[in-house]
Image (cartoon, grey):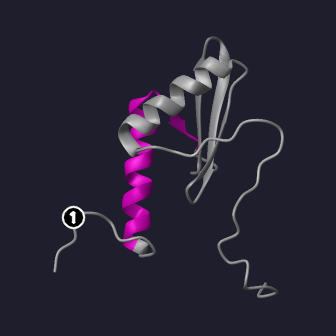
Amino acid sequence: MQLNKALYGCLKSVIIWYDTYITTLKDMGFKINPYDLCVANKMIEGTMCVIAWYVDDNKISHKNPKVVDDIIAAIEKRQGKMTVCRGKKHVFVNRCNNITNYF
């Protein structure tokens, strides 16, 4: 059997997703941070824009909310629709909430 898309949960799927995502960001002019490969930076309107991600959760920071809107739209055009939260409080779903004290 051959898959047409990456299968969620497989190591190779993670690598494919990461490569696709950073290609999207690089095509938008972002530079991947050499010290943290899940952070991308770009100067926009004279101010640093930072995108940081963990698995499939992203944080996009810029002082102009319109810039953030434009970045979200550009990423969604290539990667598909995202759920967007704005404000000072955010809830990240713990996918392993039934596993505790393993570390």
Q: Is residue 30 visible?
A: no
Residue 10's place in the image compared with 67, above or below, is: below
Span of residues in magenta: 12-33
Mark 1 closeness class: few <14, some 14–19, many ≥20 residues within 10 Å: few
Q: Secondary structure at mark 1?
A: loop
Query: Where's residue 28, x and y in %?
Result: 43, 29
* Amino acid on which the number 1 mark rests in the picture: Asn
Left or right of 39 on screen, residue 90: right
| Residue in the picture at 22% in, 71% down | 3
Residues 50 and 33: in front is 50
Query: Where's residue 81, x and y in %?
Result: 45, 43
Query: Which of the 4 quarters of the picture holds residue 68?
Result: top right
Count how many numbered circles sit on residues in the image.
Answer: 1
Residue under numbered circle 1 = 4
Query: Where's residue 32, x and y in %?
Result: 53, 41
Query: Where's residue 29, x and y in %?
Result: 46, 27
Residue 6 located within the stretch drawn in magenta: no
